[in-house]
Amino acid sequence: MAFPITRLRRLRSSEPMRRLVRQTELSPADLVMPFFIRPGKGERRPIASMPGHYQYSVDELEKAVGEAVSVGVPAVILFGIPEKKDSRASGAYAADGIIQRACRSLKNRFPKLVVIADLCFCEYMDHGHCGVIKNGVILNDPTLELAAKTAVSQAKAGADIVAPSGMMDGQVAAIRKGLDRAGLEMTPILAYSAKYASAFYGPFRDAAESPPSFGDRSSYQMDAANLREALRETALDLEEGADMVMVKPALPYLDVLSEIRRRFDAPLAAYSVSGEFAMIKAAASKGWIDERKVALEALTGIKRAGADFILTYYAIEAARWLD
Ligand code: PBG
C-alpha cells in the first residue's frame, strides 16, 4: 500500500511512539570492556592514542574494573603486557603470567563478572608476531601447541572464556582439545573468526606494545577485500568447536557481520577496535562531532547489523550514557 494510505512518519511522531516500534535496543548488558594490564604496582599509564584508557597494574585494574561493574557492564576482555618477551611467548602461559594474575584477582574480587582472556602471542613474542617464527616464516602448527597450553593456563587461572585471536588454522580445535584434556570442558571459546589485517588496530599496538618488528600480519589475518572467506573461517571455527564467533573490526565490516548473522546461529560478537574509538575521540575533541551521539549511533549500527554483543572501548561511557 502506497502513499497517501501509508505514511511512515505516523510512527515517528513522538519519542514514546518511536520507542514502541524501535527495532534495536542497546543495553549495557551488550558491552564488553577491554583492559590492558602491565607489571608493577600502582601503575596507571595513559595510552596517548586512546584517551581515557590506561595500562594498569593488577592492583589498579581492580579499581578500573569496579567502575565497569558498577555501571552494569557484564564482561571484560584482558590483554597483557608481560615483563619480558621471548621467542616462545612463555609469558602467555606462565602460571604467574600477567593475565593469569589478573584473572585470579578479578574473579576473586568480582565473582559474577565474565572475564574473557584474549589468547594471542604478539604481546609475548620478542618479534611481535602472533605465532612461532622460523627463518622469517610464521609457523602454524607449532603455534597451536602454545595456544592449547595458554588456554589451559588462562582457564585454570579463572578466565570464564578464552578468545583466540591469532588467526592460525586449526587453533579452535587445538584449544578445545587442550581444554577438554585438562578437565576444562565447560570453558567456552570465543573465536575471532573473521579478523582482518586492519590499519584500524594502530592505537592498540601502542597500548599493548605489540607491533610486529618486521613485515605485517597479512599472512594470517584476512584481506579486507574478502567476505566469502569470512564465511569459510566462521564455518570452520564452528566445526572445530567455537561456542561464539566474532568479526573484527566492526564498522568497516558491517556487511560481514550481517552475512554471518544470516547464515549461522551461534552467538556473534563484534569488536569495535582501537582505531574506531580513536577516530571518534579525536573528532570529538576538536568539537567536530557530538561524541555521545556518534558513539551510541555506531554501537547501535553494529548491533543492528547482527552483533549480539560488542567489545568496545566505549563500554563504560556508553553504559553511563544509556542509564
Ligand atoms: C592481537 C590483537 C590485536 C587486537 C586485538 N588482539 C592487534 C593485532 O592483531 O595487531 C586489536 C584490537 C584493537 O585494535 O582494538 N592479535
Image (spheres, rainbow, N blue to C red):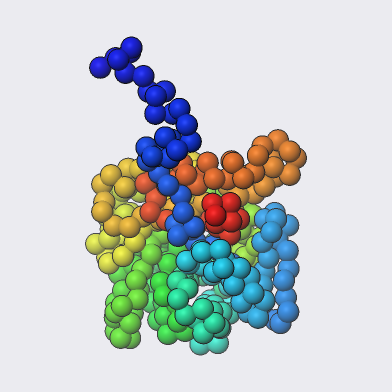
Farthest right residue in view: 286
Which quadrant would the N terminus be assigned to in this image? Answer: top left
**Percent from the top left, x then y, of residue 159?**
45, 77
**Quadrant assignment, res 150:** bottom left
**Quadrant assignment, res 83:** bottom right
Observer-nearest of 10 and 244: 10
On screen, residue 222 above or below 72:
above
On screen, residue 54 above or below 250:
below
Farthest top residue in view: 4
Work out whether residue 318 can be spotted. no
**Percent from the top left, x then y, of residue 156?**
42, 85
Which quadrant would the C terminus be assigned to in this image? Answer: bottom right
Q: In this view, does 249 lie to the left or right of 180?
A: right
Number of marks in the rendered image: 0
Residue appearing at x 68%, y 65% in the figure: 54
On screen, residue 305 above or below 204:
above
On screen, residue 158 above or below 190:
below
**Percent from the top left, x then y, of residue 113?**
47, 73
Q: In this view, does 33 lie to the left or right of 165?
A: right
